[in-house]
């Protein structure tokens, strides 16, 4: 690609204003662009639903029936076709779920008393007051399981020590289903008669700050919005307009919040520089200040709408999706409470939280179901202030994110030990890539950092066309390899010595890791029996539960689960719809459900230059709550960048925090209902997510609807409770609670729209849509999401109609983000994309936290050859430059400069041909442009001011995420330049519209529907 490409992409003549209004009018061609599909009938809110929600099969969440762990699935000779909906079935229609016993106590998302967290929970007969309650800090006897976690541990009462002796008994592990310990969760027997009507009696308030009553300020007169345009007046005379109305509460708050800015009218066709100079700000819910201060961090819990509509019909009118995005196990500093009493609502099992109200010292009212509960005697003592009679000052009521060390009633079996099994492909193809060496080396280096305690167990399986087990029993002089050649009926040769105690057998484990890379170097075996290897792993792990890490380098070819290539490379860039996004067989999904039932999660590391059918293999991780990693061109010699990335990723993977035998439940205030879940898990009962493993890099999303009008409610709350076993064998409960205001006008709903959260949710919904319907359907649905929201805004919120494409400031990035999604690898069409690459992008969109999804969708671009100290951050005496974020257009590039693109898992440093020799010398350490290596992945540590600045900036970006983004230094001749250019999403490509063209298309559709 030559420099001429800078201008050639966006039309003839190299006009200086490439994407702007000066361009010739563009004609859209429905057949080739894919944006012009006729919108479905009735372009109302259901439009979004009909286009983004899966069809009727969204309710086919099947209740989990634990199969016998020892009955392997026989490979169906002809895999059942068309029965699989890999994304859709993990949903459940909670909205159908009603408690019939008490119509007054309906909790939209959860049956009032049925709570699996509380198995055998009994009301203590006497409330013990422990006079020795005290607060201890990090380093206290109460163990903390976090890696990078600083914890304040509040300890009151006597913590229940984990019961672990049962699992350490020297006898053989149970081998039949009846002996397998049941999971620690299960339905809690309903307690009839416990539910009561919401009590509305007015009591004297204890502390006004904890009453769920917002301060409603007096309405203030409307004032015109601030002059919206920084650019000189252009084509249209811009009248001063504002929202049709602001509700009294919002108008009142407008002086002290960002509301007027959120609703500032932006004409997208005129205002080109809509990117903020720095990170896009997250809207703050319009709550009273004391609640705002205490609310859950948006890094953990985010809603697409920070103001919740009062009714479903209002939500329908807004045409914006309603949902939550969660990052529940994020590495955090959080308070940890050890208490003999975990205070929860007796009706809906909500954990006491900052948004409940105390009616008096002895009673609190649940903010989810409104039941009035007693304050237990234990709770009267406040360990922080060491005073009695101040329950509202307890840490549980002061922190929206908190972790409890759970007493024994939260477990059905003793907390399991950390168990790690590594399953490695050692076929000829695998050995060729050199990955075994990297795995063993990294594991050896981090063996002592694996999360766990004295009970931690480890094991290894390797496989090609046969399965190899390793006896690591204490006392052996060296590891013993046991080969099972019968892959039709997998059995464990020495069941007791394959998973061994890491501490007791560390030397044997180290011996094995040192010798494994050489053991198969001469192998000529090309076949892969992945299915049987996974069955063996399941058999080995099912008595205990734990984590299986599978490394696979090719399509499985023999035994159960064998697959055939489905991808036709000639069809990769075809305009026709993309095929084979759903699995070829249900073997992997079924095995994953078996694993889930036995608290086993399977993580998949796929390293292959050839088609591996990620759509099928990925099911093993998706339904067992595992993680998926993909290194498509991994080769230790040919692709050192990938090797480096893998080693950093794998180190993070091995050492990051892990939770075992976990479940998560998300509750919300009565009237709201959660109906679709996104992420890697299995929905065990209506709304209980089964997570055999949970890791700090996993994100989740849910969609919501409004089942009952929220007329008498000024605020609603959402609570995510994650019950897990820490690697130290503690049962813990992490609770996040978020509170949001309820509003009754469309302008208020729009003012609270969180454009990034909306984009993230739309991306997840579109992945589902691509699989259950077609990719083109999903693309149309995303485009319609942008069009519909702007129609609604224009028709219902804007007071004065005017020409142009108008958006409220808070949604001004929405069309850009939608265009970016259409050009994202998961959804783009017309360019040659390997099916596995596309599937991997889809997997990431569904299972990553929002912050990383946004970098995937819309990377950040900075000019870095002229970094200054202006606005720089000073962190621990390091000066971190803060260059301005640039639009993703070649217009912003310059042959004289150097540009850094941060795309989340990859970073690209593009060096222009005429980049200054000073930069080349002082940052890259080369004399001239031609000496910039084609494959360069690191900046040399040069002792120059320029080098220090740019390395500080890149280092700072890297520090903000737990995984390791690889830096690719590219110039015009680099093969990766095409990749870099593909991210210039504002520009036109052969098969996709420029941003300006896309806006024109959206405008056309919006004006058709304008009132
Ligand atoms: Zn409740």
Image (cartoon, helix red, strand yellow):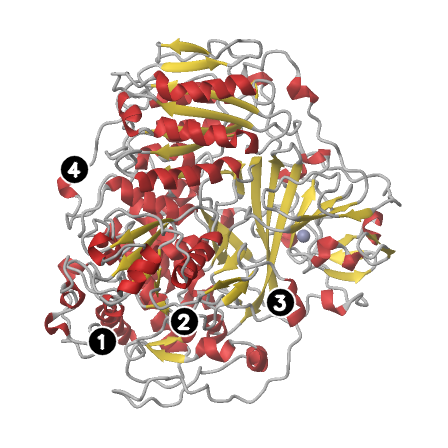
Residue that extends furthest to the left in the rendered view of this protein: 12
Camera-side mark, 2 or 1: 2
Q: Who comes first in sequence, dot 4 or dot 1?
A: 1
Give how far apart the Cα atoms at labels 4 and 3 are.
54 Å
Give how far apart the Cα atoms at labels 2 and 4 are.
43 Å
Residue at 44 percent of width and 52 percent of height: 958
Q: Count the numbered circles shown.
A: 4
Residue at label 1?
Answer: 20
Residue 886 percent location from the top left of the image = 34, 68
Disc 3 within 8 angstroms of ligand 1 (CB)? no
Along the line of sight, the residue nearer the viewer: 905 or 918: 918
Residue at label 3?
Answer: 292
Give how far apart the Cα atoms at labels 3 and 1 are.
40 Å
Image: 721 above or below 627: below
Image: 502 above or below 4: above
Q: Who comes first in sequence, dot 2 or dot 1?
A: 1
Residue 687 percent location from the top left of the image = 53, 44
Along the line of sight, the residue nearer the viewer: 554 or 53: 554
Mark 3, residues whose alpha carbon is within 10 Å: few (<14), some, or many (≥20)?
some
Quick one: quadrant of the N terminus?
bottom left
Q: Find numbered disc 1 in the image and state the secondary structure of the residue it sits on.
A: loop
User: Taking the image as drawn, is residue 630 in sight?
Assistant: no
Q: Who comes first in sequence, dot 2 or dot 4?
A: 2
Residue at label 2?
Answer: 277
In screen coordinates, is 297 left or right of 910?
Answer: right
Camera-side mark, 3 or 1: 1
Give how far apart the Cα atoms at labels 3 and 2 are.
26 Å
Mark 1, residues whose alpha carbon is within 10 Å: few (<14), some, or many (≥20)?
some
Residue at 54 percent of width and 71 percent of height: 743
Give how far apart the Cα atoms at labels 4 and 1 are.
39 Å
């Amino acid at each position: 690609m030559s420099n001429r490409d800078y201008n050639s992409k966006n039309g003839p003549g190299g006009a200086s204003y490439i994407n702007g209004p000066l361009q010739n009018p563009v004609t859209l061609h429905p057949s080739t662009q894919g944006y012009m599909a006729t919108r479905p009938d009735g372009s109302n809110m259901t439009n979004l639903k009909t286009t983004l929600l899966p069809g009727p099969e969204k309710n086919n969440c099947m209740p989990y029936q634990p199969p016998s762990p020892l009955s392997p699935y026989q490979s169906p000779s002809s895999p059942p076709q068309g029965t699989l909906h890999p994304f859709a079935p993990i949903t459940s229609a909670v909205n159908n779920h009603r408690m019939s016993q008490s119509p007054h106590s309906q909790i939209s998302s959860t049956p009032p008393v049925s709570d699996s967290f509380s198995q055998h929970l009994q009301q203590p007969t006497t409330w013990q007051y422990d006079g020795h309650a005290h607060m201890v800090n990090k380093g206290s006897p109460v163990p903390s399981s976090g890696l990078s976690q600083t914890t304040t541990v509040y300890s009151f009462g006597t913590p229940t020590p984990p019961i672990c002796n049962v699992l350490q008994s020297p006898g053989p592990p149970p081998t039949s289903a009846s002996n397998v310990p049941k999971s620690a969760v299960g339905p809690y027997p309903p307690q009839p008669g416990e539910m009561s009507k919401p009590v509305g009696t007015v009591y004297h308030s204890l502390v006004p700050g904890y009453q769920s009553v917002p301060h409603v300020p007096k309405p203030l007169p409307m004032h015109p919005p601030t002059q919206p345009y920084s650019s000189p007046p252009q084509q249209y005379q811009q009248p001063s307009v504002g929202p049709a109305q602001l509700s009294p509460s919002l108008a009142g708050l407008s002086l002290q919040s960002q509301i007027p800015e959120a609703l500032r009218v932006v004409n997208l066709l005129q205002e080109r520089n809509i990117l903020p100079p720095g990170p896009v700000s997250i809207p703050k819910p319009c709550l009273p200040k004391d609640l705002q201060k205490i609310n859950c961090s948006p890094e953990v819990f985010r809603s697409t709408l920070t103001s919740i509509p009062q009714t479903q019909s209002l939500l329908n009118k807004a045409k914006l999706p309603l949902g939550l995005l969660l990052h529940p196990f994020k590495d955090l500093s959080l308070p940890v409470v050890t208490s003999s009493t975990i205070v929860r609502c007796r009706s809906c099992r909500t954990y006491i939280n900052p948004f409940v109200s105390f009616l008096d010292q002895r009673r609190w009212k649940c903010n989810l179901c409104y039941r009035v509960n007693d304050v237990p005697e234990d709770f009267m003592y406040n360990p922080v202030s060491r005073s009695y009679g101040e329950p509202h000052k307890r840490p549980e009521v002061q922190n929206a994110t908190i972790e409890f060390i759970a007493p024994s009633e939260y477990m059905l079996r003793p907390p399991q030990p950390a168990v790690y099994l590594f399953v490695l492909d050692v076929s000829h193809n695998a050995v060729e890539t050199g990955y075994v060496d990297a795995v063993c080396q990294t594991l050896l280096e981090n063996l002592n950092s694996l999360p766990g305690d004295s009970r931690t167990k480890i094991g290894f399986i390797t496989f090609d066309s046969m399965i190899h087990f390793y006896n690591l029993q204490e006392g052996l002089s060296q590891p013993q390899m046991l080969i099972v050649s019968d892959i039709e009926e997998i059995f464990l040769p020495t069941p007791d010595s394959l998973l061994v105690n890491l501490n007791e057998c560390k030397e044997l484990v180290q011996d094995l890791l040192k010798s494994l890379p050489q053991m198969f170097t001469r192998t000529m075996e090309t076949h892969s029996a992945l299915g049987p290897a996974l069955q063996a792993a399941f058999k080995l792990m099912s008595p205990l539960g734990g984590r299986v890490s599978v490394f696979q380098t090719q399509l499985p070819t023999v035994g159960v689960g064998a697959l055939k290539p489905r991808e036709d490379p000639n069809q990769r860039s075809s305009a026709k719809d993309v095929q084979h996004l759903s699995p070829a067989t249900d073997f992997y999904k079924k095995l994953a459900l078996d694993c889930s039932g036995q608290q086993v999660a399977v993580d998949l590391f796929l390293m292959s230059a050839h088609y591996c059918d990620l759509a099928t293999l990925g099911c093993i991780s998706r339904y067992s709550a595992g993680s998926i990693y993909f290194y498509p061109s991994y080769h230790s010699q040919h692709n050192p960048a990938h090797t480096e990335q893998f080693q950093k990723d794998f180190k993070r993977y091995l050492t990051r925090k892990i939770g075992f035998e976990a479940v998560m439940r998300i509750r919300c205030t009565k009237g709201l209902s959660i109906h679709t879940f996104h992420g890697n898990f299995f929905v065990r009962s209506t709304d209980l997510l089964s997570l055999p493993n949970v890791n700090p890099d996993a994100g989740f999303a849910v969609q919501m609807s409004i089942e009952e009008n929220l007329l008498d409610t000024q605020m609603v709350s959402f609570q995510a409770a994650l019950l897990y076993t820490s690697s130290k064998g503690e049962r813990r409960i992490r609770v996040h609670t978020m509170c949001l205001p309820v509003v009754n006008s469309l302008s208020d709903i729009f003012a609270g729209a969180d454009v990034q959260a909306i984009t993230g949710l739309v991306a997840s919904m579109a992945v589902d849509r691509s699989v259950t319907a077609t990719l083109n359907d999903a693309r149309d649905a995303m485009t319609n999401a942008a069009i519909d929201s702007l129609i609604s805004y224009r028709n219902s919120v804007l007071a004065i109609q005017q020409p142009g494409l108008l958006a409220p400031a808070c949604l001004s990035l929405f069309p850009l983000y939608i265009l970016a999604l259409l050009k994202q690898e998961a959804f783009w069409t017309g360019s040659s994309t390997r099916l596995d690459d596309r599937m991997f992008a889809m997997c990431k969109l569904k299972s990553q936290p929002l912050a990383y999804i946004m970098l995937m969708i819309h990377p950040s671009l900075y000019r870095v050859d002229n970094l200054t100290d202006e606005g720089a951050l000073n962190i621990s005496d390091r000066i971190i430059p803060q260059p301005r974020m640039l639009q993703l257009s070649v217009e912003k590039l310059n042959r004289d400069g150097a540009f850094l693109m941060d795309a989340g898992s990859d970073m690209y440093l593009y060096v222009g041909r005429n980049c200054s020799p000073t930069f080349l010398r002082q940052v890259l350490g080369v004399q001239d442009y031609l000496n910039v290596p084609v494959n360069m992945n690191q900046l040399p540590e040069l002792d120059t001011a320029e080098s220090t600045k740019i390395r500080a900036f890149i280092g700072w970006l890297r520090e903000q995420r737990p995984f390791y983004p690889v830096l690719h230094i590219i110039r015009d001749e680099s093969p990766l330049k095409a990749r870099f250019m593909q991210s210039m999403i504002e520009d036109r490509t052969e098969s996709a519209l420029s941003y300006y063209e896309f806006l024109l298309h959206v405008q056309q559709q919006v004006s058709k529907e304008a009132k």
